[in-house]
Amino acid sequence: MNINWNAKGYADHFQFVPRYGNALLELLDISEGMRCLDLGCGNGALTGKLADQRLLVTGLDDSSEMLEIAKKNYPGLAFVKGSAVDFALDEPQDIVFSNAVLHWIDPACQPNMLACIFRALKPGGQFVFEMGGKGCTANIHRAVRAEFESRGLSYSFPFFFPTIGEYAPMLEQAGFRVVYAVLFDRKTLLEGEDGMYDWIRMFLKKPFEGLDSEVSEEIVRAAVNALRPLLCENGTWYADYVRLRMKAVKR
């Protein structure tokens, strides 16, 4: 994971992330009492939904700030701090579930992460996830990159957005059988008149590391202005999301 979260800001303004994850629950084959790991559980919103399905769920996240909120909001559930690329559990899981997390994992670390998930699952266990897919937020990155480059600065792209054809072989190499895969556009509403500004500030931290605060502000404001004709409709901002949703089974 390559971001330090503003946990309160995330909870206040970006609840669409777990809300869209509700549709991912429909891919699960559930029996009462199954064990489930919510990988990258964040503030626990979807961990709670998984528990509502009568699963024995554990939330794992690398952000202490997010876990503090999760434990406060869902005191009856189990949450542990850990890295998605290096974790081990005491009990084998029937399900590993992950929403809007895997695109934060550097490509070089993806095989280690998939190996951890494979080891965590029982034979026949389900790995169900959604992540950013090829082309996700392309307009936003294009605008921010242009502002960086116009100032002679290098833009560090902070995400891994694969195609089905790129990610399915990685799953198969890890020992999984892919049983469902879809890549789809999802125009996503951003909250408030400063929705795009808030999105860039929340999710694009890495490219701005080490930059002077005034230069950073100038870049963000200029990018927002460039994006207004593309992604703002009648005063409402949208992000041009593309999602990769998959289900794989441990062989």
Image (cartoon, rainbow, N blue to C red):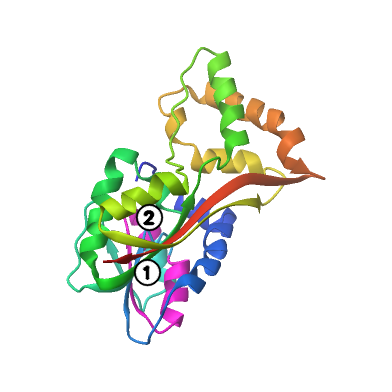
Which type of secondary structure does the marked residue at label 1 adopt?
helix
In the rendering, at what x and y percent does residue 64 appear?
33, 55
Q: Earlier in the sequence, mark 2 or mark 1?
A: 2
In the rendering, at what x and y percent does residue 89 appear?
20, 67
Asked whether 192 or 180 is in front, the reply is 180
Which type of secondary structure does the marked residue at label 2 adopt?
helix
In this view, the residue farthest toward the left is: 90
Magenta-colored span: 44-67
How packed is label 1: few (under 14 Cα within 10 Å), some, or many (20 or more)? some
In the rendering, at what x and y percent does residue 26 appear?
51, 73
* Image position of 39 (left or right of 224): left
Q: Which of the 4 image quadrants contains residue 121?
A: bottom left
Tell me the quadrant of the picture where the C terminus can be found. Answer: bottom left
Alpha-carbon distance for marks 2 and 1?
10 Å
Residue type marked 1: Lys
Residue 234 visible at all: yes
Residue type marked 2: Glu
Marks 2 & 1, CB-CB < 8 Å contact: no
Q: Is residue 232 above or below residue 7?
A: above
Q: Is residue 98 above or below residue 6?
A: below
Task: Kindly identify which residue carries mark 2.
Answer: 65
* Image position of 40 (left or right of 14): left
In this view, the residue farthest toward the top is: 152
In percent of the image, x 29 and y 39: which residue is there?
A: 108
Residue 71 badge? 1
Residue 250 badge? none
In percent of the image, x 54 and y 57: which residue is there?
A: 17
**For residue 21: magenta?**
no
* Image position of 71 (left or right of 99): left
In percent of the image, x 54 and y 69: which residue is there?
A: 22
**For residue 45: magenta?**
yes
In the rendering, at what x and y percent does residue 227 appear?
69, 33
